[in-house]
Amino acid sequence: MNISDTKATLSFSDGSPSVDMPIYKGTIGPDVIDIRKLYGQTGKFTYDPGFMSTASCNSSITYIDGDKGELLYRGYPIEQLAVNCDFLETCYLLLNGELPNAEQKATFTDTVTKHTMIHEQMNFFFRGFRRDAHPMSVLVGTVGALASFYHDSLDINDPEQREISAIRLIAKLPTLVAMAYKYSIGQPFMYPRNDLSYSANFMHMMFANPCEEYKVNDVLVRALDRILILHADHEQNASTSTVRLAGSSGANPFACIAAGIACLWGPAHGGANEAALTMLKEIGSVENIPAFIEKVKDKNSGVKLMGFGHRVYKNFDPRAKLMRETCHEVLNELGLQDDPLFKLAMELERIALEDEYFVSRKLYPNVDFYSGIVQSALGIPVSLFTGIFAMARTIGWIAQWNEMIADPEQKIGRPRQLFVGSPVRDVPGIDKR
C-alpha cells in the first residue's frame, strides 16, 4: 500500500475548514481515500449503505475488475487456475500466496487428507436435527460446534495454530456437507477415504453406501473440482466481510466460518444457483419459455430471471465461460443432452445470448446458472447447492481471516450510523401513555 503524491481535499460550504486526506494506491484497481481521521477532524461520518464505495481493509488475496470481467487469485487469472490446477493447489495458493511445487503439493494434500475425519461424537449432533432440516442449518451448527473439539488450535495469535485450524476446516467441510446430505435421506454416513483425491472423496462420501461399491467417474470429479476452484474466493463479498467482522472481535475460526455460512445462506448471496434451478423447474418445458420471457420483460409481473447477469461483473462473469464448458462435458458424459430440464436450460441460454433485451442489459448466463445445472446433473439435490458453495468458499474465508488477524492495522469492526430516531425525551407515567 503506497501513499500517493496527491491528496484529497474535502471542503465545506458552511465555512468549516477544509480537510486534507491521504490517498493510497494499490497494485491495481481504484485508489482509496483514507478517511480514518475524518470524524476526529470534522465531527462528521461518511454515509455509505452497503459499503459500496468503502474499502474495509487492504488485502493481497483476490482481485476483481467487474468492468473487465477479471478475477485473480494472488495475481493468477481464474481461467488459468481452473484449467491448470486442482482445488487443493488453489487452496495452498490462497493460504500461502504462491502455488506449491510438487513436494509442497504432496505434503499439503497429505496433511489435508489426514484431517478429513471428524470426531465420532459429532455423529450425535446430527441426531438433534429434524430429518428435513436445511443442510445450511446443519452446517451452521456443526461447524460452530467444531470449536468444542479443538481447544488445541484456538489461540488466534499463534500462526501455527491458525494454520492447523485452516487445515481442519478445509479438510472437514466436505465430510460435514456429505453427512448433512446422508442424514437427510436416511442413509448411513460414509467415512472419508485417504486413497481418494479431495473431490473424489467428497463424491464417494455423498453417493456411496455400504451395500455396493461406488465407482468414481473422473469427468464428474473434475467438474466438482472446477466448481470448488471457481467459488474458492471472491474478494470482500457479504459472507467474507461477515467472517472478517466476526474475526475482528477475536472470535475463534470455527465460529467465524459458521458466521460466514449463515450469511452465505441468504438467497441474494449463496442461494443464487438454487434460485436459478428452481426457476428452470417453474418454467417447466421449452414450450413455456416465450411466455416466461415476456413476463421477465414486463416490469409489473414481478417475475425475475435468475442466474443471469451479475452485480459485480458488468460485461461477463469470467467463471461462467469455464463453468459452461464443464456443464457441456458433464451432460455429454452422462448422456443428458435430451433431458427435459437440461434442454430447457440450453434453450434459455441460447435466447439470452441472442435476444436484444438481454444482450443490451448484459444479462448473460452467470456462474450460478451453469453450476446449478452441473450439480443437478451430478445428482446433488438443490437444497445442498449452497452447502457445496460453503465447502468451496471456506478456503477463501479462512485465508481472508488469517490475513486480517496478521494485519497490524486490524481493529474490531464498528460501523457508524446516521441516527434518524427520536431525540432525547422523558418517560411519562403509565397513566399518561
Image (cartoon, rainbow, N blue to C red):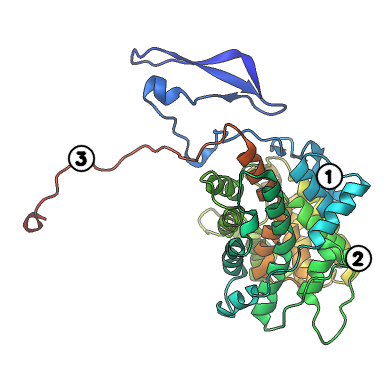
- Outermost residue on the left side: it is 431
Q: Residue at x 92, y 48 (%)?
A: 103
Q: Quadrant of residue 430?
A: bottom left
Q: Nearer the viewer, mark 1 or mark 2?
A: 2
Quadrant into which the N terminus falls: top right
Residue under label 2, please give it. Answer: 218
- Secondary structure under the numbered disc 2 in the rendered image: helix
Report the residue at 78% width, 50% height from top.
91
Callout 1 amino acid: Glu
Which badge, 3 or 2, comes first in the chain's sequence?
2
Q: Is residue 38 left or right of residue 3?
A: left
Closer to the camera in the image, 30 or 404: 404
Q: Which residue carries the number 3 mark?
A: 424
Compute the Cα span from label 3 to label 2: 67 Å
Dot 2 alpha-carbon crowd within 10 angstroms: few under 14, some 14 to 19, many 20 or more? few
Alpha carbon distance from label 3 to label 1: 57 Å
- Element marked by disc 3: loop
How many marks can you see?
A: 3
Which residue: 66% across, 40% down?
Answer: 403
* Relative to 45, residue 402 above or below: below
Q: Earlier in the sequence, mark 3 or mark 1?
A: 1
Badge 1, how many Cα within 10 Å: few under 14, some, many 20+? Answer: some
Query: Is 392 or 320 nearer to us in this picture?
Result: 392
54 is higher (above) or lower (below) than 376: above
Asked which secondary structure carries label 1, the reply is helix
Residue beneath label 1, please? 79
User: Quick check: can you spot residue 344?
Assistant: no
- Tell me residue 246's x, y (percent): 53, 49
